[in-house]
Amino acid sequence: MIRCRDLEKIYEGGKAGWPALCGVSFSITPGESVAVTGPSGCGKSTLLNIIGLLDEPSGGGYEFDGLDAARMSDGERSAARLHRIGFVFQAFHLLNRLPAVENVCLPMMYAGETSEGMRRRAHELLARVGLKGKERKTPLELSGGERQRVAIARALANSPKLLLADEPTGNLDSASSREIMDILFGLVGEGMTVIIVTHDRELAVRAGRNIKMRDGKIESI
Ligand SMILES: Nc1ncnc2c1ncn2[C@@H]1O[C@H](COP(=O)(O)OP(=O)(O)OP(=O)(O)O)[C@@H](O)[C@H]1O
Ligand SMILES: [Mg+2]
């Protein structure tokens, strides 16, 4: 599903001569769960953004789902992000003025789903992450753990093949973290491919595979 070959990333305006990624190669097959760990600044988010087609490498090759990312047009990249990849971030990135259900509907709206269809699916997804009865609450009326559940439901809206999470439990207390982990690994149990960037050892050990990074390189895999 994912093939990275000799990935390099040099940010314009970044420290000269200091690539954020330097010769990163690995593959991930469908259904795998992978934790990406390593010290702050080692390139984890940079790697995840390239995998999620949010950013492009400066060198090397990246194949997503059999497609060479370098040959994808902007339209193909956004379509892949909308339909095939779900994103979950540490800071949730929800729209605070919209109720949970509307947040979950957004990706389906962009995908052209009917109003009734998206509402039904949003309710199902919110029930699945344990938020039945809280569909009309806005993010500001929900706890951190509940906000992250909304973000996971939103990430699942268009039935992606790949779920990417960048420190999904970074802002949560340990009880909420455990609940979010259970949801994420429940998805792995259903066959979802999941890549999680994390500082959380407990999360990392539950993943099928651990990619340890240091200074833009893979230290162990
Ligand atoms: N937009 C950018 N412009 C310039 N340099 C950047 C940019 N984003 C990241 N970097 C640099 O690239 C390197 C890798 O950053 P990255 O965000 O991938 O690290 P990280 O492993 O996710 O760290 P953290 O654990 O703190 O989130 C760092 O040296 C960082 O300063
Ligand atoms: Mg990061």
Image (cartoon, helix red, strand yellow):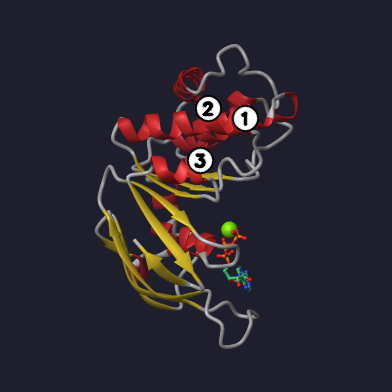
Tag of residue 110: 3
Assign the C terminus to one quadrant of the image. bottom left
Which is more N-terminal, label 2 or label 1? 1
The amino acid pointed to by label 3 is: Tyr
Give the class, few, some or many, for how many residues have Cα within 10 Å of label 1's Cα (few <14, many ≥20).
Answer: many
Picture coordinates of residue 95, whole percent (x, y) = 68, 37
What residue is shown at x 48% (from left), y 38% (from top)?
Answer: 155
**Left/right of residue 158 with respect to residue 208 in the rendered view:** right
The residue where tag 1 is placed is 145
The amino acid pointed to by label 1 is: Gly
Q: Are marks 1 and 2 in contact (CB under 8 Å)?
A: yes
Q: Is mark 2 within 8 Å of ligand 2?
A: no
What residue is shown at x 52% (from left), y 67% (from top)?
Answer: 43
Tag of residue 179: 2
Tag of residue 198: none
In front: mark 1 or mark 3? 1
Name the residue furthest bottom: 17
Picture coordinates of residue 13, whole percent (x, y) = 65, 80
The amino acid pointed to by label 2 is: Glu
Which is more N-terminal, label 2 or label 3? 3
Q: Are marks 3 and 2 in contact (CB under 8 Å)?
A: no
Q: Is 175 rendered above or below residue 134? A: below
Q: Inspect this view and state whether residue 78 appears.
A: yes
